[in-house]
Image (spheres, rainbow, N blue to C red):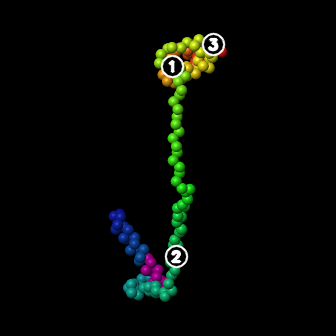
Amino acid sequence: MRLPGPILLISLVVLALAACQGEVLRQAGSPAATHTSPADIPTPSKTSTPTATPTPSPTATPSPTITPTQGPSPTPTPTLTSTPVPVCNCSANVYDCKDFASQAEAQACYGYCWQETGEDVHHLDGDSDGRACERLP
């Protein structure tokens, strides 16, 4: 016969209790068939000695470390950035390679105008390799 879960559990508990009671009776010298009332079963007596219960000890919590400062930080002074000194006129195509004494001078004009306008205003770099007036000394 199959019993529902709670009823089965209760039945098992009752059987276990009955078996334990029979064991107690046998140890006391009584026959197993003798039934005694719960009042006849000896209960443990209270002791007068207190039991020590361990108490957790507090743990140390680290406190924040305070780092001393050396006073207020100086306010940085802004650095003036100078605008590039005009090397040549970049408003129109007004120079040829013959207008420069050296390749370095032509390159300076080419680089300045490239930075200002984004193009080779004077057409100083004929082969578009980034070097102006390559035939100049």
In the picture, measured across the screen, residue 1 lies left or right of residue 43, that is left
127 or 39, which is in the foreground?
A: 127
119 or 93, which is in the foreground?
A: 93
At horizontal 52% and vertical 43% (from top left) the residue drawn is 77
Mark 2, residues whose alpha carbon is within 10 Å: few (<14), some, or many (≥20)?
few
**Residue receiving disc 2:** 54
| Residue 103 spot, x, y in % from top left | 62, 17
**Residue receiving disc 1:** 89
79 or 17, which is in the foreground?
A: 79
| Residue 99 spot, x, y in % from top left | 57, 13
The quarter of the image holding the C terminus is top right
Can I make out residue 31 in this image?
no
Majority secondary structure of the magenta segment?
A: helix
Q: Disc 2 vs disc 1: which is toward the camera?
A: 1
**Residue receiving disc 3:** 135
| Residue 40 spot, x, y in % from top left | 41, 87
Q: Disc 2 versus disc 3: distance between alpha carbons?
A: 96 Å
Of callouts 2 and 1, which one flags the residue occurring earlier in the amino acid sequence?
Answer: 2
- Asked if the residue at tag 3 contacts the one at tag 2, i.e. Cβ–Cβ closer than 8 Å, the answer is no
Point out the stretch of residues depicted in magenta. 19-28
Mark 1, residues whose alpha carbon is within 10 Å: few (<14), some, or many (≥20)?
some
Local SS, label 2: loop
Local SS, label 3: loop
Mark 3, residues whose alpha carbon is within 10 Å: few (<14), some, or many (≥20)?
few
The quarter of the image holding the N terminus is bottom left
Please name the amino acid that badge 3 sits on.
Arg
Can I make out residue 46 in this image?
yes
The quarter of the picture where residue 14 lies is bottom left
| Residue 115 spot, x, y in % from top left | 51, 24
Of callouts 3 and 1, which one flags the residue occurring earlier in the amino acid sequence?
Answer: 1
52 or 41, which is in the foreground?
A: 52
At horizontal 35% and vertical 66% (from top left) the residue drawn is 6
